Image: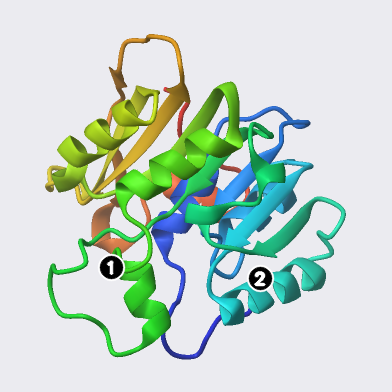
Amino acid sequence: MAQPREGYRFSVDSILLAWWVAFEADDRILDAGCGVGVVGLALARCRGARDVTGVELQGDLAALARANVAENRASAWMSVVEADLRELPPAFGNRFDVVCANPPFREAGAGRLNPAPEKAAARHELTLTIGDLALAAAFALKRGGRFYFVHRPRRLGEIFSALGGAGFRVERLRFVQPREGARANLVLVASRLGGACETVVMRPLVIYGREGAYADEVAAIYEGRGRPLYED
């Protein structure tokens, strides 16, 4: 998997997101802000998705994503479009069954801004806020479509507000803990466009077990035998 030597580099949250998404094989999936294509390729190559479109604003990352698609012989199942999620092409409207995203976690003014532009945009909401992302997903999805993403627990209030404002209802939450008993540092969110539903809070997902090795559920993913993370 090609990625920049410096600047943007994918991490475990991308892998968790790829196994959080629920879909049928013939669903159209939009990977919103796809970076170098990690999530979309995992969906296509490891989980059986057959129609994935990646959208990436940064030209260098979009080019790497296309190269990764070709290198992984996934061109029949995944394509990459260089575009701004805030201004998606009209043809994307009401087209997709599923949208997934690993968005920037930090507000534009929160913390030190990384000097590498790609990493700064990946970590801070310089070009895309939670509200922007929710509106983009609502535009792209069919009625009843599902929106899956990963974010920080401390921003759940903003997340619920942005999703509600765009017409989504949160169906499932799964908090991610670095170790058993530790405070969660990620949350996996599953929502649906339109309708009403109760929010189910699943048992936490633990990343590391004893002696620093991956816990069983995460290790199984890396070993190619992982079950979807939305299954209790």
Give coordinates of residue 97: x percent, y percent.
Answer: 64, 30
Residue that appears at 46% across and 29% down: 230
Give coordinates of residue 224: x percent, y percent.
Answer: 63, 50
The image shows residue 87, relative to residue 134, as above or below, that is below
Lower sequence index among marks 2 and 1: 2
Q: Nearer the viewer, residue 72 or 78?
A: 78
Q: Nearer the viewer, residue 202 or 90?
A: 90
* Display coloring: rainbow
Dot 2 corresponds to which residue?
65
Dot 1 corresponds to which residue?
124
Gap between marks 2 and 1 measured at Cα: 21 Å
The image shows residue 194, relative to residue 168, as above or below, that is above
Give coordinates of residue 91: x percent, y percent.
Answer: 72, 44
What amino acid is labelled 2 in the image?
Ala
Residue that appears at 49% across and 34% down: 138
The reply, left or right, for residue 151 in relation to residue 70 is left
Q: Which of 197 and 167 is in front in this view?
A: 167
Corner quadrant of residue 109: bottom left
Corner quadrant of residue 37: bottom right
As helix, strand or loop, the secondary structure at mark 2 comes to: helix
Task: Name the quarter where the N terminus is drawn.
Answer: bottom right
